[in-house]
Image (cartoon, grey):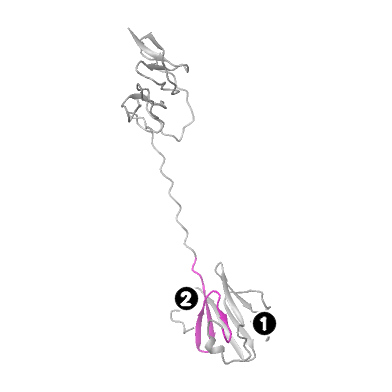
Amino acid sequence: MSRRVKHCGCGQANAEHDAFCARCGQPIFDVVAVATEPPKPEAKAESAPSSAPVVAATAKKVCPLCGTVNESFALLCGGAGCGNDLSAVVPSGGTPAAEKSPVQPAEATASPPVPSLLLSVGAQNFECRDGDIIGREGTVGCQVFSGIGTVSRRHVSFTQRDGQWFITALAGVQNITQLDGRELPRGAPQPLTGEHTLKMSTQCEVKLKVESSKLQAPSSR
């Protein structure tokens, strides 16, 4: 017995009704009668495992436009007058190998709580915020300092960077300002890491405290 096939320049033998080569996708015209022989199984060389799914040899690509059954490696449909792109068509009839489990995103690490800064003036407590200023015209506790003439209008500021509190003596301050008995250099932020005594003049001394939990009911600002 013999069957009629179409040979392509790449060496691929295509079915008689194929208009395009199932291997390279080129148009094919030559028809040659060849004897029908059952294909001999080719010995497959062992190769390193691949991450891509392995498809059984019986799998075929079915063209979604004309319904022609093509080889699993076909890039274009070989149906007469079709030539549809099959690169995105998944071969059917085969059993894909086990797929890798999707990588689960790592759980986001919770950021550590930002410590709070407490200002104590006598029996009054105030919770400071990033950018706050204390002084006669400050943003926190100004009602306490407004009547103290030796305190500047804008005396010191508090800033926070990466969970760390800093205190800065502002430019224009006339009186010597001390933190824990040491003079604060003007314009140079100094870290706050616990309980401190801030002396803005001989008539004004306050307490500062950095703590991990915020005040439940701070006094009015």
According to the image, label 2 marks what residue?
214
Q: Quadrant of residue 52?
A: top left
According to the image, label 1 marks what residue?
172
Q: Nearer the viewer, residue 99 or 76?
A: 76
Residue name at image x 35 percent, y 13 percent: 38
Task: Name above or below for residue 179 compared with residue 160.
Answer: below
Tell me the magenta residue range. 112-137
Q: In which quarter of the image is residue 69?
A: top left
Task: Name above or below for residue 47 compared with residue 174.
Answer: above
For discs 1 and 2, the disc positioned in front in the rendered view: 1
Three-letter residue code for mark 1: Gly
Q: Position of residue 145 (x, y in %)?
A: 56, 88
Residue name at image x 36 percent, y 23 percent: 81
Q: Which of 37 and 142 is in front in this view?
A: 142
Q: Is 172 positioned to the left or the right of 20 in the image?
A: right
Query: How dense is the environment of label 1, judged by Cα within 10 Å: few (below 14), some, or many (20 and up)?
Result: few
